[in-house]
Image: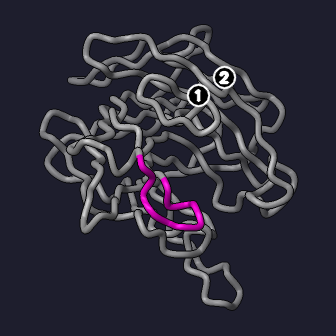
């Protein structure tokens, strides 16, 4: 286990030596915009629920991404350290525009987040990796793999604060899309409600961990390109044809938040 001075320890996979290469402990009073940017678009269009509001640091080295409601609609934030071509608006012409400069991109290593999950069912949280050019080639080594280290929906769409999933997606998000992963992992109780989620990404595959325990391995498709980190939340119901909040979301008791203690990236040395 490894410490960042003044902060909690990481739970690192055994059998390797690790060196910290990037981290955010969410110190201070404002989000570090030199590390994070906001995602506003989904598949080239402005998403109704993606916002840059409702994100704050609590003064105790925690990031809060909160669920917001206004006039019967709901909003929450996506944070990322880079972007892909689908984050750019579609003008009806060539849909690929210049990407914003990433704040952090990396290949291989151990990616870890310590966090407390939302309690309400109507929205979900995720900690994941994505490539700027995912789907641009059917070869995942070249185009990258979406690596969902943590998602709080599982069991085929059921959103839960106690059951999470790990998944990998490649081949884009159209007819060539493929995926593999663990549908559901039930979390054990912890004294403060926080959990460690991580993935060890190597040239041979991905090994997933929850609270220091190995939970899944995936070797079917492995990215060999640099990818960026996302801490995201999303409101349920807005991907349907009606584009309206789901019944679970309408029943959500506010306030509710995805609370993140730290995000760290280590290289094997």
Say which label, 1 or 2, has the lower sequence index. Answer: 1
Instruction: State the residue at coordinates (59%, 39%).
Output: 157
Horizontal side of 19 relative to 38 (left or right) equals right
> What is the span of residues highlighted in magenta in the rendered image?
237-247
**Residue 199 bears which disc, if any?**
1
72 or 48, nearer to the observer: 72
Q: Work out which quarter of the rendered image holds the C terminus and state it.
A: top right
Judge whether residue 124 is colored magenta: no
Residue 66 screen position, x and y as percent: 27, 48
Horizontal side of 230 relative to 249 (left or right) equals right
What is the secondary structure assignment of the residue under circle 2?
A: strand
In the rendered image of this protein, does residue 245 appear above or below residue 6?
A: below
Q: Where does label 2 land, which residue?
A: 207
Residue 107 screen position, x and y as percent: 64, 42
Residue 81 screen position, x and y as percent: 46, 54
In the rendered image of this protein, does residue 4 appear above or below residue 102?
A: above
Q: Quadrant of residue 24?
A: top left
Per the picture, the main secondary structure of the magenta-coloured stretch is loop
Horizontal side of 258 relative to 216 (left or right) equals left
In the rendered image of this protein, does residue 171 appear above or below residue 184?
A: below
Question: How far apart in space, not on screen, are marks 1 and 2 (Cα)?
Answer: 5 Å
182 or 263, nearer to the observer: 182
Judge whether residue 244 is colored magenta: yes
Neighbor class of circle 1 (other Cα within 10 Å; few <14, some 14-19, many 20+) is many
Instruction: State the residue at coordinates (71%, 57%).
Output: 134
What is the secondary structure assignment of the residue under circle 1?
A: strand
Q: Are marks 1 and 2 in contact (CB under 8 Å)?
A: yes
**Residue 249 bears which disc, if any?**
none
Q: Work out which quarter of the rendered image holds the N terminus and state it.
A: top left
């Amino acid at each position: 286990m490894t410490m960042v001075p003044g902060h909690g320890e990481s739970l690192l996979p055994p059998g390797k030596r690790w060196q910290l290469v990037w981290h955010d402990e969410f110190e201070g009073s404002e989000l570090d915009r030199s590390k994070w940017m906001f995602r506003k678009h989904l598949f080239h269009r402005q998403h109704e629920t993606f916002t840059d509001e409702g994100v704050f640091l609590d003064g105790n080295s925690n990031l809060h991404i909160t669920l917001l409601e206004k006039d019967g609609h709901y909003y929450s934030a996506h944070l990322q350290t880079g972007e892909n071509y689908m984050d750019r608006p579609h003008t009806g012409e060539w849909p690929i525009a210049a990407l914003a400069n990433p704040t952090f991109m990396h290949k291989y290593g151990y990616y870890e987040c310590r966090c407390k999950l939302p309690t309400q069912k109507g929205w979900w949280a995720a900690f994941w990796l994505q490539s700027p050019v995912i789907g641009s080639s059917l070869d995942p080594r070249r185009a990258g793999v979406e690596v969902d280290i943590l998602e709080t929906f599982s069991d085929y769409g059921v959103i839960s604060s106690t059951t999470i999933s790990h998944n990998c997606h490649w081949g884009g998000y159209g007819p060539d899309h493929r995926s593999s992963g663990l549908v559901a992992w039930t979390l054990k109780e912890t004294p403060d409600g926080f959990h460690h989620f991580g993935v060890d990404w190597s040239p041979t595959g991905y090994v997933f961990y929850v609270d220091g325990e190995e939970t899944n391995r995936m070797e079917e498709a492995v990215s060999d390109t640099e990818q960026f980190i996302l801490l995201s939340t999303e409101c349920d119901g807005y991907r349907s044809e009606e584009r309206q909040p789901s019944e679970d979301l309408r029943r959500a008791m506010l306030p509710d938040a995805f609370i993140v203690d730290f995000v760290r990236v280590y290289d094997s040395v």
